[in-house]
Amino acid sequence: MAPTMASVFLPLLAATGSALAAKFSPSSVSRSTTGFGNTLPNKFIVEVDNASDIPGKRALDTRSAHEVVYDSLRKRDLGFQVEKEFNSPGLFLGSVLTLDNANDAAKVLDIPGVKAIRPVTLIPAPKPVKLHVVTGPDDPQVPPDTESTHILTGIFGKGIKIGMCSSEVNLPHPRSIDTGIDYTNPFLGGAFGPGNKVIGGFDFVGDAYGTNTPMPDDDPLDQCNGHGTHVGGIIGADPNNPFNISGVASQASINAYRVFGCEGSVTDDILIEALLQGVKDGNNILTMSLGGTDGWTESSSSVVSSRIAASGRIVTIAAGNDGSKGSWYTSSPGNGINAISVASLDNTVIPLQNATVHGVAHDPIPYFDALPLPVNATLPIFATSNDTTVVDDACNPLPDDTPDLSGFIVVVRRGTCTFVQKLTNIAAKGGQVSLIYDNGNGFSNIDVGNFTAVLIQAADGEFLVNQFAAGVPVAISFPQTGASFQFPDPSGGLISSFTSYGPTNDFFFKPAVAAPGGNILSTFPVPLGTFAVLSGTSMATPFMAGVSALLFEVRGTSAQTAKIARTLFESTAQRISSSHTDGDPLQTVTQQGAGLVDAFRAIHADVLVSPTELITNDTAHFRGVQTFTVKNTGTSEKTFKLSHIPAGTALTVQPASSQVLQDSIFPADGPVPLNATAAKVSFSPKSLTVRPGQTKTVTVNITPPKGLDAKTFPVFSGFIQLSNGNESYQVTYLGLAAALKDMPVVDNTDVFFGVDLPTLVDGQGNFFSDPENFTFAGADFPSVLMRLNFGTPKLRFDLVDSDIKLNTTLNTRGVEEGGTHVFEREVFSFPHNPGQGTFAKVKVLGTIFEADFQPRNSDVNDGTGFNELSIPTPQFANGTTIPNGSYRILLRALKVTGDPTKEEDFESWLSPVIGVQVPS
Ligand SMILES: *[C@@H]1O[C@H](CO)[C@@H](O)[C@H](O)[C@H]1NC(C)=O
Ligand SMILES: *[C@@H]1O[C@H](CO)[C@@H](O)[C@H](O)[C@H]1NC(C)=O
Ligand SMILES: *[C@@H]1O[C@H](CO)[C@@H](O)[C@H](O)[C@H]1NC(C)=O
Ligand SMILES: *[C@@H]1O[C@H](CO)[C@@H](O)[C@H](O)[C@H]1NC(C)=O
Ligand SMILES: *[C@@H]1O[C@H](CO)[C@@H](O)[C@H](O)[C@H]1NC(C)=O
Ligand SMILES: *[C@@H]1O[C@H](CO)[C@@H](O)[C@H](O)[C@H]1NC(C)=O
Ligand SMILES: *[C@@H]1O[C@H](CO)[C@@H](O)[C@H](O)[C@H]1NC(C)=O
């Protein structure tokens, strides 16, 4: 955000902030360092050069690159411990080190031979969006086999090796323990080892990992959770099972690498180990149904995944299930530049149940549950209100004259208060079973706690209430068998709303393609039911791994096939609309990627269009003129006509709202609003003829859409179609009609905590702005509470003199309002020596915390909503004691695409005065 814009935003936000209730409660602040990419204290992944490339290392020196670096560390008295080493020349050489002092990280980076140092980060266990263990072939919840299988005949991925980093998730109820893929499932081969479907693998962690240190063993058996077993079945379940499903590549061989315990997260060093092992074991494809919110392409596991893909293997990784959190929010390692990040498509039907109506002629009433409500009796209905437009039905205790409801099916309207609140009021009158009818919010799964209640559609509810009011004796029953109903999913065939939105903050194209991932039936551990229905990008990802196996089987397993795989998938994918309403635009490619994979067309394509991702980048780095080539690998001449097919432009930041009369700085939640104003695209030539073996070049000129508010950071996208009769291929494009550097990085509003952020928090958990002294005994220490409204490549907290004269970008309000932060507005003088950089000219006493490539925060208080930096000991990050005295904390966050040597490319905030007063 440019300083001039800041002064426009701030006063307006101040005026409206007080009118809005704070979103988060101050008590949600935990007073420990949270957020900041979930890094492990003092643990770093250090990447080293090849031994021969280390400057100053002599040819006769036989030490390994690792040893050379350790010796240099020792020479400099940097305390460290080697936790593990990676030794895959060409892919990754390095170690996991625990440093005695976390701030030695900067010094480690200066050592000859050290290429990169990154903190070890945590990646949470994947959570399926929906989970159901099916009970048998007659289970009503078995979805029809619409998308997931039999996609091609005669190709089963035979001889292709797929390494899956299997993962576990918590089931909603506790399970007894055990361990990656349950190969004892008869449809996953029933056994483990060469000759079976699951030919091998490794357990890097053991069951107790997550709460424990990893306990590796060579058996990836999964019987405690099931996610990995479900993923394995999507890749390769055998046909001829009771459900008549089969994996996409049922003759492929699977190596399972278990990286999650029964509960908890995994650290990315373990992912890297598993990936490198997967390469050593000769897998053609590596697939990972996991990830953590990131937004950057730079994490260690992203970088390694990308290198593996570039070296000639197909790497498929989930895009993430954070669609509700809006754009710029895809996961790592799926963000790895050359990896195939996978979006999910919703199945066309939802398996629901019907209730039967008695006493009046009416069709069965579908209710939103996969399993029948456990109610045997046929019971009369009772409506809590006879008014079908009541907005707050049963939100208050029911009237005294309400009869005992235990013998009724209670009918109540959705709205105003929570479902649990309504049901609690109904239960107070004895009600045990309720039908809640929709008020226009949408027919979906609802949270009813442990009550026996389900949602029905508005029209059915209104019918029942009207009958009740008219005195018609209507009763309802819930058939326990035979009442399953394949409800046509209104969002069927669309991208699953849970799919995370890209692009990355460095403007890479994520996700790449979509595959079915909503309501997928697949194998499950035998002790947990053998089959289950799950939803998530975790389910779409193994589908892509399976399709990749088919591609390899037909085209051969060469590195060349792997390197063009994503291009083939993207150029032949099917474009997906943003809705089923005629005239609505195509879904933004930031959520659908290039569209739904079309295995047949990808495998049999005899035209290679490349590249398939034309990225114009932002307006400050705009590349509007681009080229792609069209290579005819077939046997006949083809003439292609080119046309432009725009997708909806994603308004990634909330537009100015008339209600609050202000510009919002916050990213828009999903579903991200689309605008039909599209880019203009012209090409030359407009049509082309390519003979067999010939390659031709097309030049494209992309002009961003005009008239959109740049403050909504509009991400435009679309397709260039090449058609030759029935045959067609496509190229996608993606750009930003704004400059990334203008995106406000640090949240400086009071919307989330009722006070302006960033703020200091004292030992009692109070926000403070007047000077305060701290003894650093017990809880008597300060913390900084802040939110990142957008990702930042560099975040730094330095201690500065309390009298510093500095013009920060985020504290100007104190000056304007005469509030507590009064800083002299002495203009920062830029030095004339550009070599040093203006950033380095700011006089700091020492660094307290520094982190690179931080993701933005979400607006949900689930651990991703804010960051907190606690300072429990009066020490700089390098371990040096902070002497008693009075200081301020200077927070600086680099704007995306900013220059880290330029102070003016950072947003900055200076804290109130903190006194360090440790008693002597
Ligand atoms: C379920 O209810 C719907 C809507 O009334 C109806 O079309 C369908 O036939 C019913 N199916 C079963 C199995 O009862
Ligand atoms: C419904 O009836 C079946 C068969 O009689 C019985 O097994 C089941 O427990 C009953 N369920 C309830 C909720 O009463
Ligand atoms: C239902 O949930 C409430 C609130 O969580 C709890 O107090 C109650 O014990 C639960 N009842 C049953 C039967 O599980
Ligand atoms: C709703 O209608 C029924 C049937 O006519 C009647 O018995 C009941 O009192 C009405 N409820 C209310 C709140 O008016
Ligand atoms: C977009 O431009 C920025 C700034 O030059 C650069 O860092 C980034 O890599 C570019 N992104 C792509 C996809 O080229
Ligand atoms: C799209 O943006 C244009 C230009 O700002 C505006 O006129 C139009 O109303 C927008 N359309 C939608 C559907 O928001
Ligand atoms: C902090 O301690 C110093 C040294 O004792 C004292 O001069 C100062 O007034 C104290 N400040 C506050 C706000 O208590």
Image (cartoon, helix red, strand yellow):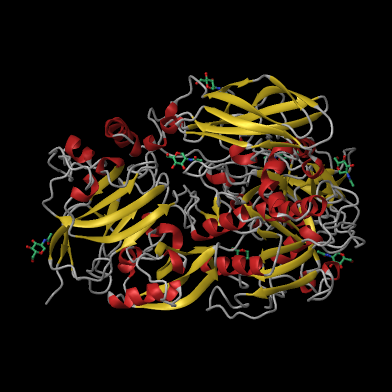
Q: What residue occupies the far front of the structure in this picture?
A: 60
Q: Left or right: 554 with respect to 17? A: right
Q: Left or right: 96 with respect to 236? A: left
Between residue 870 and residue 75, name the one nearer to us: 75
Q: Quadrant of residue 433?
A: bottom right
Residue 557, percent from left and from top: 75, 56
Q: Quadrant of residue 5?
A: top left
Q: Residue at x 37, y 30 (%)?
A: 662
Residue 254, percent from left and from top: 76, 66
Residue 437, percent from left and from top: 71, 42
Does residue 366 appear in this view?
yes
Q: Residue at x 16, y 44 (%)?
A: 806
Does residue 47 appear in this view?
no
Determine whether 73 is above or below 541 in the image: below
Q: Left or right: 682 with respect to 101? A: right
Ligand 4, seen in the image, is in the quarter at top right
